[in-house]
Amino acid sequence: FQQDQVLGSFGVEQFLPTGGNYSLGYQASRLKNNNIFATLNPSTQGNLTFSFVQPLLQNRGIDATRQQILISRNNFSISELQFRNTVVSTVRDVKNAYWDLVVAQSALAVQQQTLDLSRQTLGDNRKRVEVGTMAPIDIVQAEAEVAANEENVILAEQAVAQAQDRLRALILDPRTADFWGTTFETSDPPSLATGAVDVEAAVQKALESRLDLQQARRQLENNDIRERFFRNQVLPNVTANVDYGLAGLG
């Protein structure tokens, strides 16, 4: 006895935005053998099936799958906002570090000028002592002032070095070989011009541009989605079902 059989099938199934789903399938087979008593030889068989299910109350407006999709979309937006917030914070920190360096360099220049003036005063006082127009005790006070100004210059130089370190850490890669040897020369002077400010427009722009507020709104939307889902789950489970099928034998 010898028998040959060929089987084939295909199908498609999809969830719908309404919460329902449908499926369509077809199966076919062909059978051939050497049995002389077989009624149909070869025999073929085909089956077509279609099914449609639509929730009417529970899972109609929202279900677990759509809940996850909506929350995932909001979480994706939150991730983008967090990235933008990181970029904005980094740019702000770089700007602040730059202007801190400008301030530190300006303070150092002032301290150096003060030191030069105190040294000049000390030299003038020594000449006055030599000619007898000033008491020697006044030189001690001038020397103390020079020493104090030298200390201020050292502190100002330290402040400049620290400002360079902060700006360097924000801009450069610490793994580079010349990281600690790189210094920055400021080029843009501070702008001291003032202008009229529209307070209401500035506040409105600030509220619209606040990335943390936008993230909070997305979190509130996620909470609303979860609340809507759980409210829907307490409804009765009522569904409409449509099934259709064809079968053929030849």
Image: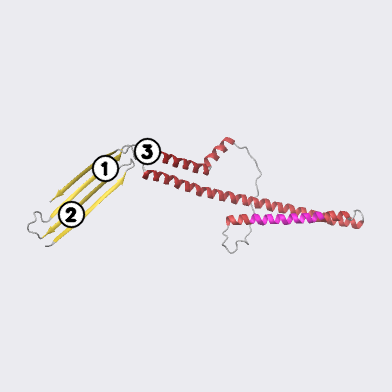
Pinpoint residue 235: horizontal percent, then vertical percent. Answer: 35, 37
Q: Give the residue pinned by disc 3.
A: 232
According to the picture, the residue beneath numbered tag 1 turns out to be 52
| Magenta extent | 144-164
Q: What's the residue type where badge 3 is placed?
A: Asn
Residue 234 spot, x, y in % from top left: 36, 38
Q: Left or right of 228: which side holds 238? A: left
- At x 64%, y 56%, the residue is 164
3 or 1: mark nearer the eye: 3
Local crowd size for mark 1, using a 10 Å CA cut-off: few (<14), some (14–19), many (≥20): some
Q: Amino acid at mark 1?
A: Phe
**Considering the image in quadrants, where does the N terminus appear?**
bottom left
For the residue carrying disc 2, how many other residues have a C-alpha within 10 Å: few (<14), some (14-19), or many (20+)?
Answer: some
Contact check, label 3 and label 2, Cβ < 8 Å: no
Instruction: Please state if 174 lies on the left or on the right of 227 as rendered.
Output: right
Q: Residue at x 59, y 36 (%)?
A: 199
- The residue positioned farthest toward the top in the image shown: 200
Q: Is residue 71 above or below residue 149?
A: above
**Residue ID for mark 2:** 29
Which tag, 3 or 1, sits closer to the chain's start? 1
Which residue is found at the position 45% from the left and 46% from the top? 75
Q: Is residue 162 magenta?
A: yes
How far apart are the two marked residues, 2 and 1, measured between alpha carbons? 25 Å
Majority SS type along the magenta span: helix
Mark 3 Cα shell of 10 Å, populated few (<14), some (14-19), many (≥20): some
**In the image, what residue type sits under mark 2?**
Ser
